[in-house]
Amino acid sequence: MTATPETTEAMLARVRDSIDRQGMMATLGVELVAVSRGRVELALRHDERFTQQHGFMHAGAVAAVLDSACGYAAYSVMPPDASVLTVTYTINLLAPAAGQRFAITGAVVRSGRTLVVCRGEAFADGADRPFAAMQATMTALYDRPGISG
Amino acid sequence: MTATPETTEAMLARVRDSIDRQGMMATLGVELVAVSRGRVELALRHDERFTQQHGFMHAGAVAAVLDSACGYAAYSVMPPDASVLTVTYTINLLAPAAGQRFAITGAVVRSGRTLVVCRGEAFADGADRPFAAMQATMTALYDRPGISG
Amino acid sequence: MTATPETTEAMLARVRDSIDRQGMMATLGVELVAVSRGRVELALRHDERFTQQHGFMHAGAVAAVLDSACGYAAYSVMPPDASVLTVTYTINLLAPAAGQRFAITGAVVRSGRTLVVCRGEAFADGADRPFAAMQATMTALYDRPGISG
Amino acid sequence: MTATPETTEAMLARVRDSIDRQGMMATLGVELVAVSRGRVELALRHDERFTQQHGFMHAGAVAAVLDSACGYAAYSVMPPDASVLTVTYTINLLAPAAGQRFAITGAVVRSGRTLVVCRGEAFADGADRPFAAMQATMTALYDRPGISG
């Protein structure tokens, strides 16, 4: 038995559909900038609701979007019937999240049978050096009732 | 020269004041449950605005509160004129954040001259096993204009 | 069908047998101090062959033993036919590895179907505060030719 | 006051001198392949003394060399009077360390006043995909008696 390979269009629709179902992404106002197999770019804007005590964007908001960028990068290389869950990630906050618009990328380093390792980076206002860097481990789930995408 | 040691009351006021200045904590509806030197407990409630695609609370929301619990645990053992910033953390998501109320703790493992290492755990609805675990590295900042608490 | 639960003696023999097959543990001179379900304690001695440039034990030697302590803690709660592999770990070096004898512990935080999350700590010469802390993710493998223990 | 910038030759000598003082690197048989400002490549060979229970190189050996590659990448961009210590790192083991010769790289992601964040990758026998990936946080130390390099 051979499966018909998923088209790029179907993969894009699958990723977009999953993003659309995340309350967190809508609440944070995250925009999908680009998707290809193994790489996703999202954008986040400065928002007073999500600041830390010094007025910069809270690491948690940045981490949530980096986590999603890595998760969708992993999801883009998984079989269509898989769901993706984050196992663990490490984030380094290299500088405060100071800026108006943040470009947040996730890319697959290597994908195995069930685990996919990704790296993400966050850039402020067109900077070429990241202010945050993530290394994340994602897992593919199959046939879990109530879990899809 | 010897400094007068900070009283517990002054430390509690300092932590509470810093939490009150975090837009992110207010937006997430985080409640301060307990503070002592080197340990902080926060509470988070399930909220549709912060879910992932399967309807559970997004790892980013849980991570933000774990990060804060660890950050305030570190802050509680820092000198009164220090500010706290997260250097890096690792989070393991051990199970979905399924529940109505999440108890989220941070505790100092060891504090050095400028770096403080903490561990955090998140528990759903009175469970005794955590559904998320964090290991975090915090830093003390001094004399940075525009940065306090 | 119900499997006969593994006896504690069988589990201990299984862990000891796996440790005995690790060239790295023998080379580092690691001693097995204690094993129970979900918890392992190993001991490492200061050795000039494994120092870093300042004369302390290299973080890599400490990490290797912490990794093994966590790995065997995970292995102790896995089914007898599973093999254990490290997926990822984070280590914080809280102070130099200064001392003659290092007690190194690993304990299971939570075990799932294939992933087990553990935490480890390293103590120098009877100190009660760790000089290194690990958070590790282990996986159970089944039916891989050439892989056992 | 302006300091005379360190020449590349002086930096290379400083890195090589520090590596030469690491007992661990000599014991593991690590070879220095390349150094430039912010990037270091080391090589490790398969050695029965450093295997895990399945006969592959132990993650601890790979981690020690990745840690060193990241540490020396950080050291190469630090002032000449600084010493380097590892604060924390996260390693993902993406596949077993199966091979005869391992190329192990470390590169600076961003350097701050005292902390330098690096990423490292390990490749087996000329493979173009890494079998291990590290994200590491290094710190610069000054004026600590008994600590240099």
Image (cartoon, coloured by chain):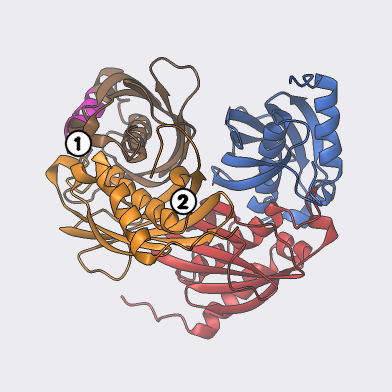
Chain colours: A brown, B orange, C red, D blue
> Of discs 1 and 2, which sits in the foreground?
2
Horizontal side of C122 relative to A42 (left or right) equals right
Q: Amino acid at mark 1?
A: Gln
Residue B86 visible in the current orientation: yes
**Chain to which the residue tagged by mark 1 belongs:** A
Residue A95, given in percent of the width and then of the height, sits at 47, 31
Q: Disc 1 marks which residue? A: A22
Name the residue at the front extreme.
B1
Q: Amino acid at mark 2?
A: Ala
Toward the top, the furthest residue is A126
Q: What residue do we see at 85% from left, 45% from top?
A: D21
Q: Residue at x 18, y 33 (%)?
A: A27
Q: Position of residue A24 (x, y in %)?
A: 21, 37
| Residue A45 highlighted magenta (yes or no) | no
Q: Chain of mark 2?
A: B
Q: In the image, residue B63 lies at what x, y percent?
A: 33, 47
What is the magenta range? A13-21
Look at 69% across and 32% down and name the residue there: D73
Q: Is residue A20 within the magenta segment?
A: yes
Gap between marks 1 and 2 measured at Cα? 26 Å
Residue D142 vs residue D29, the one in the foreground: D142
Is the stretch drawn in magenta largely helix, strand or loop? Answer: helix
Q: Which residue is mark 2?
A: B136
**Front residue (pair C121, C7):** C121
Q: Is residue A41 above or below residue B37?
A: above
